């Protein structure tokens, strides 16, 4: 996606004037510094306003007041100190699915850590062939391209790792009510607030790339959810009774994700297990898991360092690497 020179200039002006909020910058001096004409300055300032930035402007001066809550590359990258995750950002207003775009970019060689975001998805994908309801400007729709060096059998744990990253980021908003429903649903007060769809492109012994798709319901109100999920879904805004800044939440998620991914590359989930257990909604519950065509019932007792769920039943200990869980008894 090529940005117009006007948009690039707008970005550079924002970066300069937001260093000192409310301070007045002379337009003439800014133009000189950026080596552009007053006309070019004027059109760029117009773009800045259209994007929703609050600025004070008169004929001679401009000052920065506040940034809009938009998932643009400019906003996401601002003061994000990650080394890997988010080092390239592709942000869109509307796409079919950020996972589709991320897979296309990965096929063309996009580097590890590239992210794709959108304000809206028209064909958002969920797990097991379901759809992900993705209304405009209220949610976070994010895909992260990874190129891990480990073997493909270690990829499934990335879903649990991603759910952990989201759960940790959400804990700052709803401290004690966040849970992970293995493998990759995130719940607040028992309702689903976020989901992870991990897509793997691999050969027998080598991962080409992984796309981790993360959807978070952020500022949806109850009426924004379709009837089919109205009883089971929620948003961070509903649960915290606050309007959430999506850019802040997205950046927190990217920061935690980078930290967790570095740990995962070293020793899978070993150093995260304590936190995963703390967040788990299933441990010590009687459950049944549908894994492929098999259904296994028993008591969920643990999650291991590969991200598998450990179940105990009359025939012993079962290790399940993926599946769909139903809780039988609370
Ligand atoms: C699930 O819980 O079923 C997984 C939902 C994953 C949704 C996200 S939104 C961003 C990314 N793009 C998609 O099409 N899906 C994932």
Image (cartoon, rainbow, N blue to C red):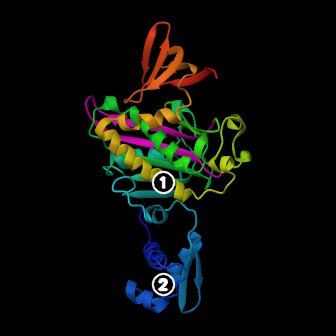
Q: Is residue 295 depicted above or below 153 in this figure?
A: above
Mark closer to the observer (1, 2): 1
Q: Position of residue 15 (x, y in %)?
A: 45, 74
250 sits to left or right of 319: right
Q: Main secondary structure of the magenta part?
A: strand
The quarter of the picture where the C terminus appears is top right
The quarter of the picture where the N terminus appears is bottom left
What is the quadrant of residue 151 in the picture? top left
The answer to which of marks 1 and 2 sits earlier in the sequence is 2
Q: Is residue 187 visible?
A: yes
Magenta residues (range) = 191-220
Residue 14's disc is none
137 sits to left or right of 231: left
Name the residue at 64% across, 52% down: 219
Farthest-out residue, top: 315
Q: Is mark 2 within 8 Å of ligand 1?
A: no
- Depth check: 58 or 286 in front? 286
Say few, some or many: other residues with alpha carbon within 10 Å of mark 1 (under 14 / 14 to 19 / 20 or more).
Answer: some
Q: What residue does disc 2 label?
A: 41
Q: Position of residue 287 (x, y in %)?
A: 57, 19
* Magenta residue check for 301: no
Q: Position of residue 39 (x, y in %)?
A: 49, 87
As measured in the structure, the alpha-carbon distance from the residue carrying label 1 to the one carrying label 2 is: 33 Å
- Depth check: 1 or 182 in front? 182
Count of picture labels: 2
- Depth check: 175 or 83 in front? 175
Name the residue at 37% across, 29% down: 306
Marks 2 and 1: in contact by CB < 8 Å? no
* Magenta residue check for 209: yes
Q: Is residue 231 depicted above or below 252 in this figure?
A: above
Q: What residue does disc 1 label?
A: 252
304 sits to left or right of 189: left
């Amino acid at each position: 996606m090529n940005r117009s020179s006007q948009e690039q200039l707008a970005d550079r002006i924002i970066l300069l004037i937001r260093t000192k909020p409310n301070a007045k910058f002379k337009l003439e001096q800014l133009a000189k510094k950026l080596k552009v004409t007053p006309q070019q300055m004027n059109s760029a300032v117009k773009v800045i306003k259209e994007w929703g930035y609050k600025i004070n402007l008169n004929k001679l001066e401009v000052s920065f007041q506040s940034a809009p809550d938009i998932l643009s590359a400019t906003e996401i990258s601002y003061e994000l100190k990650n080394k890997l995750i988010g080092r390239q950002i592709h942000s869109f207003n509307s796409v079919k699915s950020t996972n589709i775009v991320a897979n296309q970019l990965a096929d063309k060689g996009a580097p590890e850590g590239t992210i794709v975001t959108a304000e809206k998805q028209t064909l958002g994908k969920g797990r097991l062939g379901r759809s992900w309801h993705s209304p405009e400007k209220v949610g976070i729709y994010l895909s992260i391209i990874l190129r891990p060096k480990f073997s493909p059998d270690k990829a499934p744990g990335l879903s649990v790792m991603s759910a952990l990253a989201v759960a940790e980021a959400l804990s700052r908003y709803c401290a004690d009510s966040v849970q992970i429903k293995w493998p990759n649903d995130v719940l607040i007060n028992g309702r689903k607030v976020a989901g992870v769809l991990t897509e793997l492109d691999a050969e027998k012994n080598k991962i080409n790339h992984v796309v981790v798709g993360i959807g978070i319901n952020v500022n949806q109100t109850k009426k924004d959810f379709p009837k089919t999920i109205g009883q089971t879904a929620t948003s961070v805004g509903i649960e915290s009774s606050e309007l959430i800044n999506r850019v802040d939440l997205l950046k927190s998620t990217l920061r935690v994700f980078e930290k967790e991914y570095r740990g995962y590359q070293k020793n899978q989930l070993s150093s995260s297990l304590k936190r995963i257990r703390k967040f788990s909604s299933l441990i010590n519950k009687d459950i049944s898991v549908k894994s492929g065509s098999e259904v296994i019932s028993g008591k969920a007792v643990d999650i291991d360092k590969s991200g598998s769920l450990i179940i105990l039943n009359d025939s012993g200990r079962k290790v399940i690497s993926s599946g769909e869980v139903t809780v039988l008894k609370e």
